[in-house]
Amino acid sequence: LQAYRKALTILQQIAPDHEDLAATYNNVGLTLHHLQKYPESLDHYRQSRQILEESYGKDHPILAKTIGSMGNTLQALKQYDDAMMEFQAAHALLEKALGSNHPEIAKSFNNMGLLWSQQGQHEQAMHSYESAADIFTKTLGTNHPHTASCHFNIGLAWKSQGQFDSAKREFQKAREIWIYALGPDHPNLAMAEQCIQECQS
């Protein structure tokens, strides 16, 4: 954080409207988010966004990263409606730049699914997770860890709705992929096993 802030001070003096200044504001925001200083983090994201909007316009895909980061921080602040609005805005910009079948689009769907799930909107969450799983399967393959994570999240959505057989199948899929991709000693395996057991009890 100290290093990023030093860079920010220098860039504010020599390049007040440059993309590098926006990126540094974003880096400070990310660091503050990890330190759970959410309001201060959000202020830095807004500074980054303002610079990028003035330089590129409000609809340029370069804004997607900062807007998505704002969504994460708003989610941490439990401002769920605002967070979803930012996630959807970032998603639209990513689709404009990358098309509808790209791993970044899948990550965006997964982020929205996690937010829906946090609000207890499990059907909407499942739809987002399934969209993410479909894209990851097409772009990264059936046995990629990201694909497994989507199956795991789908399992959690089924489990939250009391559909334990369906949940168990998704957890098993996730476990099989993680074993293949990450090895039998990865911590994700214990998490999957626990969920499978909970569906059987």
Image (cartoon, rainbow, N blue to C red):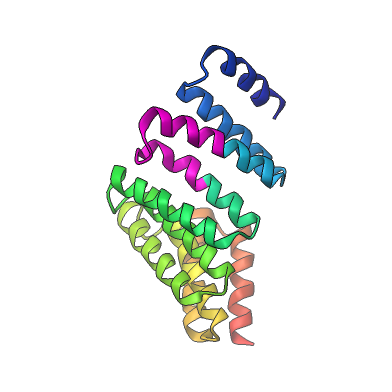
Seen from the viewer's position, the closer of residues 105 and 69 is 69
Pick the quarter of the image with the C terminus. Answer: bottom right
Q: Position of residue 5 (x, y in %)?
A: 67, 25
> Magenta residues: mostly which secondary structure?
helix
- Say whether residue 145 is visible: no
Residue in the image at 32% along x and 52% along y: 139
- Say whether residue 190 is visible: yes
Residue in the image at 65% along x and 37% along y: 31
Residue 60 lies in the magenta-colored region = yes
Q: Position of residue 197 (x, y in %)?
A: 62, 80
31 shown above or below 85: above
Residue 157 lies in the magenta-colored region = no
Is residue 43 toward the left or the right of residue 54 in the image?
right
Pick the quarter of the image with the N terminus. Answer: top right
Residue in the image at 47% along x and 60% along y: 112
Residue in the image at 50% along x and 61% along y: 149
Q: Position of residue 66 (x, y in %)?
A: 50, 40
141 shown above or below 47: below
- Stretch in magenta: 46-68
Seen from the viewer's position, the closer of residues 101 and 47 is 47
Q: Position of residue 61 (x, y in %)?
A: 36, 39
Seen from the viewer's position, the closer of residues 98 and 29 is 29
